[in-house]
Image (cartoon, rainbow, N blue to C red):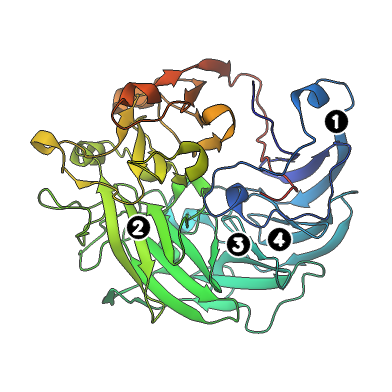
């Protein structure tokens, strides 16, 4: 049986303008909430209360476009929905509140000059960088939070990152906002956040009254590091954390995750993945995280003073090789699998991570595995599957029929040569119906198929206004 998908709307992106397109789905309640990236803080992409969108409905001929609303600027962030209003944000620092039923613009704010990526000679995101990370909504207060990149003054010179907190219904700024994001790292007071050199790509995380935003570099232009900046729902900076404290120069370890949100699977803890960067000098247990956290899945714990402390990590045994060809583990985002569907007595809380090399890592969220902790310096993880091809995305999980995981890939993976030689996008479904750490082969039932990029002229961002 195929998994049911959620009610969808699509954002059609181009370099000049974007149209927000809603698809017709009879029986969905537009007043429900999709408040964060990936259907919840576990980031599974599974909307468990979406009951009306079935394969039969999609193929019935009654499923189609409801409305089409033009917005200014490229849309990289997932739209979020609360109480009948869609919040959509763009790379020109435009924010919109749209009626989820009709597409009518309820409010629109232009929030300042966007950053010019030519200032850091990086064309990865062009022609402007504004609001890139997916906002997070606090349903209790109907407030949407997001961050923008602009300039300290005018339209050139040093850049600045600002956090906004706006009323979902009206777009009016909440007290305490906008808030400039700046300062030094709590885990390395000698390291100061450089707004010009950093990009806020991951979806924001709302956890216990604090918003967390992850940062990486622009095209690996130095000096940059992986950063997490926390700010409260009342408009105060709570902490800054860097992935490589005390490391000189431009170590990297950027947190970008191709837009995937920061994960929280248990109270007071956050999971993120970094890209290429400095590595530990030797084998290191997971419970003793080093100061060099390049190519790492990192578990952070919120401390009583709101600072963040690394308490567990995993780095692939061949991370040094990955660094040689810019093969970020953190090109993909982590997800925490639903324990009821995917957990076992030995691994009650499994998680997934996949990056540019194309291996899908099945991790124990209670013990990520450290660095070279397996036999002969190998990985100590539940399993490494693949390679399937490089991922600039995240897995998605469906807990029905024993559990399925879906992964899209965008390159051949495995090596720098293969990463640039593949022009088609295979899609792999991994069956987790019989999960057992003693029988790892049961993780590896695959059903791949491919689809061509030929004729694709716009991108789609898919979301649901059913709650997770």
In the rendered image, residue 340, in percent from the top left (x then y), is placed at: 51, 42
Q: Count all numbered tags in the image, as a single digit.
A: 4
- Does 188 appear above or below 68? below
Q: Earlier in the sequence, mark 4 or mark 3?
A: 4
N-term mark: 2 or 4: 4
Foreground pick, 433 / 41: 433
Q: For residue 224, which quarter of the picture?
A: bottom left
Residue under pointer 2: 299
Q: CA distance from mark 1 to mark 4?
A: 27 Å
Q: Nearer the viewer, residue 36 or 227?
A: 36
Q: Which residue is mark 4?
A: 94
Label 1: few (<14), some (14–19) or many (≥20) C-alpha neighbours in 10 Å: few
In the image: residue 66, left or right of residue 357: right
- State the image quarter where residue 459 is shown: top right
Q: Nearer the viewer, mark 1 or mark 4?
A: 1
For disc 1, the marked residue is: 64
What is the x, y in percent for residue 246? 20, 68
């Amino acid at each position: 049986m195929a998994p049911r998908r959620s009610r969808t709307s699509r954002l059609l992106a181009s370099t000049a303008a974007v149209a927000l397109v809603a698809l017709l789905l009879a029986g969905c309640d537009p007043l429900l909430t999709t408040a964060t990236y990936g259907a919840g803080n576990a980031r599974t992409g599974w909307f468990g209360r979406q009951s009306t969108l079935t394969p039969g409905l999609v193929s019935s001929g009654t499923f189609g476009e409801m409305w089409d609303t033009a917005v200014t600027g490229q849309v990289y962030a997932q739209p979020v929905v609360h109480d009948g209003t869609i919040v959509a944000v763009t790379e020109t620092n435009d924010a919109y509140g749209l009626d989820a039923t009709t597409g009518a613009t309820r409010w629109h704010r232009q929030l300042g000059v966007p950053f010019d990526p030519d200032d850091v000679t990086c064309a990865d995101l062009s022609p402007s960088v504004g609001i890139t990370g997916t906002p997070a909504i606090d349903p209790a207060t109907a407030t949407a939070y997001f961050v923008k990149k602009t300039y300290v003054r005018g339209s050139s010179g040093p850049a600045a990152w600002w956090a906004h907190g706006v009323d979902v219904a009206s777009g009016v700024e909440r007290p305490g906002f906008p808030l400039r994001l700046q300062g030094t790292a709590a885990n390395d007071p000698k390291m100061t956040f450089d707004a010009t050199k950093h990009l806020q790509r991951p979806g924001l995380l709302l956890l216990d009254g604090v918003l967390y935003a992850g940062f990486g570099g622009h095209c690996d232009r130095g000096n940059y590091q992986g950063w997490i900046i926390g700010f409260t729902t009342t408009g105060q900076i709570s902490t800054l954390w860097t992935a490589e404290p005390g490391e000189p120069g431009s170590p990297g370890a950027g947190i970008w995750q191709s837009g995937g949100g920061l994960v929280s699977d248990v109270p007071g803890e956050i999971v993120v993945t970094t890209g290429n960067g400095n590595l530990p000098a030797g084998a290191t247990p997971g419970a003793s995280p080093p100061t060099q956290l390049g190519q790492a899945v990192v578990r952070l714990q919120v401390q009583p003073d709101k600072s963040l402390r690394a308490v567990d990590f995993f780095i692939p045994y061949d991370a040094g090789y990955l660094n040689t060809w810019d093969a970020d583990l953190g090109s993909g985002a982590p997800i925490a699998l639903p324990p009821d569907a995917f957990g076992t007595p030995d691994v009650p809380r499994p998680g997934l991570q996949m990056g540019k090399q194309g291996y899908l890592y099945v991790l124990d969220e209670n013990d990520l595995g450290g660095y070279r902790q397996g036999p002969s310096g190998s990985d100590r993880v539940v399993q490494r599957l693949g390679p399937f091809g490089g991922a600039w995305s995240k897995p998605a999980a469906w807990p029905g029929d024993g559990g399925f995981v879906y992964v899209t890939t965008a390159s051949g993976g495995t090596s720098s040569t293969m990463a640039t030689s593949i022009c088609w996008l295979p899609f792999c479904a991994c069956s987790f119906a019989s999960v057992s750490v003693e029988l790892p082969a049961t993780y590896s039932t695959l059903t791949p198929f491919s689809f061509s990029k030929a004729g694709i002229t716009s991108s789609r961002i898919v979301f649901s206004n059913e709650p997770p």
